[in-house]
Amino acid sequence: MRIVRFTPNESVGIGSDPHFGVLNDNDQILVLKGDPLFSGIVPTETKVALKDVKLLAPIIPRSKVVCIGKNYADHAAEMDSVVPEEPIIFLKPNTSVIGPNDTIQWPRMSDRVDFEGELAIVISRICKDVPKERFADVIFGYTIANDVTARDLQKKDGQWTRAKGFDTFCPIGPWVETDYLPGEQIISTKVNGEVKQSEPLSSMIFKIPEIIAFVSQVMTLLPGDVILTGTPAGIGPMAAGSTVEVSIEGIGVLTNKVSAKNV
């Protein structure tokens, strides 16, 4: 099931407020009542065409975005780092989240802005100390994310908060796939049509059960929290005006443009 969040065109006639819906294979959206994370899947009788809406970030992380660093061995190597013995975690603020086709704003502080395509987990309920064998009980679904990073500031600061925390530095979308089972599917990133990253999700060092168990030992997870599971090798800069596409087989494609550098 593909869960979308959207604002309809005026011609649709259901108001301009954001709505949640279920997207079917015919590009029709069945509008839902309320937020499915809190209300469950409650369909209305209203359907709208995908072409008549603007897709938003499919989830609203009311609390936090948790990220896993260096979770692919070849990416750790390209960062001149050893494979970590346990997951490396950091946070992005929820104010960094934007949706599909929104613009990544280049901050005036930075001269280099990088892409990092990632699989993202959406948490379904309050949870703490989740056993690995119960990981699926707390997952609402999966989506695609881009852990945008001001690489020069990351090196300058010696830590990652500023470099990864700018507004617009966490594109998420285009929807949440609730029936997805990560395995051998390929995650890839293209910049202006050129493939920069391509690797199976199975190459993750720490798999989804380990990630959920580890993070939930550190902090309580809340409904709508998002966990980014790490990026494969091939990270690199995005020039001003670029179009970046992160795709994951079985989910879809997340597309965003990069602005000119803010001055």
Image (cartoon, rainbow, N blue to C red):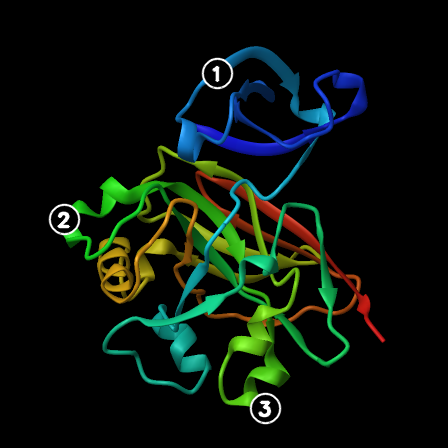
108 over 215 or under it: above or below: below
* Residue 61 placement (x, y as % from top left): 49, 50
Residue linked to disc 3: 156
**CA distance for labels 2 and 1:** 31 Å
SS class, disc 2: helix
Going by the numbered disc 1, the residue's amino acid type is: Pro
Residue in the image at 70% along x and 46% along y: 101
Residue 15 falls left or right of residue 260 = left
SS class, disc 1: strand
Residue 181 falls left or right of residue 187 = left
Q: Nearer the viewer, residue 27 or 63?
A: 63
Going by the numbered disc 2, the residue's amino acid type is: Glu
Residue in the image at 47% along x and 40% along y: 251
Residue in the image at 63% along x and 84% along y: 152
Residue in the image at 44% along x and 19% along y: 42
Residue linked to disc 1: 43
Q: Quadrant of residue 162?
A: bottom right
Going by the numbered disc 3, the residue's amino acid type is: Lys
Residue linked to disc 2: 133
* Number of residues whose C-alpha sits closer than 10 Å to that of mark 1, classed few (under 14), some (14–19) or many (20 or more): some
* Residue 168 placement (x, y as % from top left): 66, 60
241 over 11 or under it: above or below: below
* Residue 81 placement (x, y as % from top left): 38, 85
Q: Which mark is residue 54?
A: none
Badge 2 or badge 1: first in the primary sequence: 1
Q: Quadrant of residue 103?
A: bottom right
Q: How many marks?
A: 3
